Image (cartoon, rainbow, N blue to C red):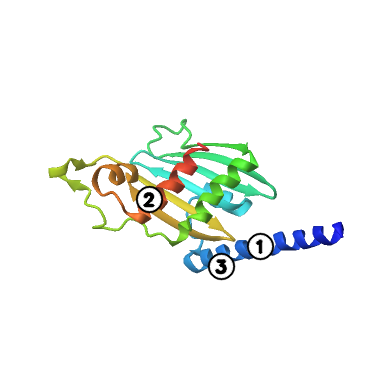
Amino acid sequence: MLKKIFLISFFSVLILTGCSANSWRKSFSQHSQVISISDSILNNIINNYNNIVIYNISSDWSDNYTVLASQKDSWFTIKYVLKKDALSANESPYTYSINPLKKFTADSVWNVFVQNQFWEIQSESPGSCDHNKKETGCVVDDGSWSSLTMISDKKTVTKRYYEPAFFETSCCPGDKNRQVFLKCLMAMKLIQ
């Protein structure tokens, strides 16, 4: 009897987790595209890891990447900074480090993306929020773009927002796409 209960429980869990895993993957696949990234270091990460999230803050002088990536049964945080303003041949144009991440923490971050169906939101589009509403004090001329890229099974979805927290709280609150973007962004900031 106990063996029968165990088997029923085991197969129930297997079926439930398998179905939910497949359903998000199917939806993700419908909204994603084949990877096309020109950066050789990011391509190396993509070729050696799976279930990847790349958080990038881009400015005129650097691209700062925080990467969540799994390899077999382990998770890692990869920090990569591309210095666009390296001053001399003696200065490295980038820094790179990799650190193991606890499975619970990594799974929690990954699940924020999956549960909020990150791949279904829209990126910021022109006109979705006026970045220069001078009369309301909503001006950010020297801000930066934040982008999040989710990669699974060699397919990718990228979303970008300009100063999303500022515009959500100060200028154009209530955008559902930006709110999901911010939830995912905050999850990634936990592993920085």
Query: Residue 179, which numbered label?
Result: 2
Above-or-below relation of 144 to 120: above
Sooner in the amino-acid sequence: mark 3 or mark 2: 3
Residue displayed at 72% across by 62% down: 12
- Name the kind of residue labelled 3 in the image: Lys
Furthest residue to the left?
Answer: 135
Residue named by callout 1:
16
Residue displayed at 49% across by 43% down: 187
Above-or-below relation of 24 to 97: below
Name the one closer to the observer, 94 or 155: 155
Residue named by callout 3:
26
Judged from the image, the secondary structure of the residue bearing numbered disc 2 is helix
- Residue 124 in percent (x, y) is at 32, 55
Query: Residue 32, which numbered label?
Result: none
Alpha carbon of mark 1 to alpha carbon of mark 2: how far? 28 Å
Q: In which quadrant is the N terminus drawn?
A: bottom right
- Residue 111 in percent (x, y) is at 55, 51
- Name the kind of residue labelled 1 in the image: Leu
Judged from the image, the secondary structure of the residue bearing numbered disc 1 is helix
- Residue 176 in percent (x, y) is at 36, 55
- Residue 88 in percent (x, y) is at 41, 32
